[in-house]
Amino acid sequence: MKRAFKTKRLWLDIVAMLIVVLCAVCFVACGDNHTHSYVDYVYNDDATCVADGTETGKCKYCDKTHTRKSESHPATGEHEYFQYLCYDCNKIDPAAPYTEGLEYTEIKDNEQTVGYSVTGRGNTGYNKYIKIPSEYNGLPVTTIGNEAFSGSAMLSVMIPDSVTSIGDGAFASCYMLNGVDIPNSVTYIGLWAFQNCSQLIDVTIPNSVTTVGWKAFDCMRLKYTEYKNGLYLGNADNPYYVLISVKNESVSSFVINGNTKIIADLAFKYCRSLTAVKIPDSVTNMGRGTFYSCKSLKTVNIGSSVTDIGEYVFRYCNSLKNVGFNGTTVQWESIPKSDTWNFGSAIKTVVCTDGKITL
Ligand SMILES: [Zn+2]
Ligand SMILES: [Zn+2]
């Protein structure tokens, strides 16, 4: 009896000790306080032509994982073309033939045909990509027509550097499109030009662009550059090239990035609580309806580099009685402005550095 009791007691001690040890291990391993130690990194098989590969490791003590750049699998740096399209990034092979059978419309200047606008896919049927030639009938292709390719299932488009204008809705709802290079010849990007291109993730706006239409890049997955509540698109030299829109319309003040050149059409539309904005000296173009219906706006200072002021910039700005201009009265008079730039606002005076202009 006594012996059996002793054995039982010993067993209880062992179990108790085991529980203590297990708890100690658990505290180190499962508690939030341990330092994760990641091991057994496995390559994710995701290196592409433009993106370095990644690898993921697992913590020795818990379920947490960690993903890092894989030193052994850098980006290939080269496109891998299959049927003229890169597997990874949908870039079109420079050796690809031009798409035949596109529709063209003559562009006339004083009865004379001076170029062509490409206006549709014509009889080309389904294309994985569209490669637009720079010439048609011996004349330059300068325009992508309004809605020319809207709703197409193409993955990629190559726009030649003869093109200066991308029309309204030209590529709207091209729901598969994720490869597009806008050449450094384009000045005008129309209303809704790339709206609802839900696979478009990156786009570069070259320094040639002067107009970006309303909702031209209203795309679900597109990556903007953010700066103090503003959404911008641009290029490697200047990621803040175009102010596209205001992220949160209920703000009362807004600071435009000091490198911004272009303000897209209707960028501040319905910012009804906005009271003051300074347009930096970097800005050259103020789009159509920039401050449309900014009913609380009381102070606007326009920078000295503005060379174009669009239509209805201050429409329904009922609280705005004067605007400031960071230049002389002579400079102000020389800026090309739409006849309707101050239409529907309360603006009576432009305050320049050397005096006032009464409207
Ligand atoms: Zn851990
Ligand atoms: Zn590629």
Image (cartoon, rainbow, N blue to C red):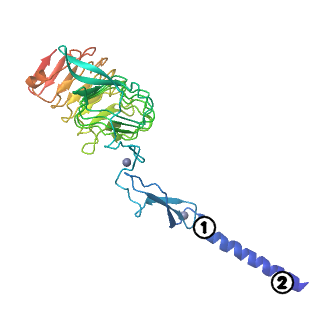
Q: How many badges with numbers are in the image?
A: 2
The quarter of the rendered structure image containing the C terminus is: top left
The quarter of the rendered structure image containing the N terminus is: bottom right
Image quadrant in which you'd find residue 265: top left
Rendered location of residue 77, percent (x, y): 34, 54
**In the rendered view, does 261 fall on the left or right side of 72?**
left
The amino acid beneath tag 1 is Phe
Of 89 and 85, the residue lying toward us: 85
Q: Residues within 10 Å of mark 2 (few under 14, many from 20)?
A: few
Q: Which residue is mark 1?
A: 27
Rendered location of residue 33, percent (x, y): 54, 64
Rendered location of residue 255, percent (x, y): 28, 36
Does residue 255 show up? no
Residue at (46% x, 54% y) in the render:
46
Q: Which residue is mark 2?
A: 6
Image quadrant in which you'd find residue 170: top left
Q: Secondary structure at mark 2?
A: helix
Where ligand 1 lies, by image quadrant?
bottom right
* 69 vs 194: above or below: below
**In the rendered view, does 48 fall on the left or right side of 7?**
left
Q: Secondary structure at mark 1?
A: helix
2 or 1: tag closer to the N-terminus: 2
Rendered location of residue 332, percent (x, y): 13, 23
Of 60 and 55, the residue lying toward us: 55
**What is the CA distance from the residue labelled 2 to the residue labelled 1?**
32 Å
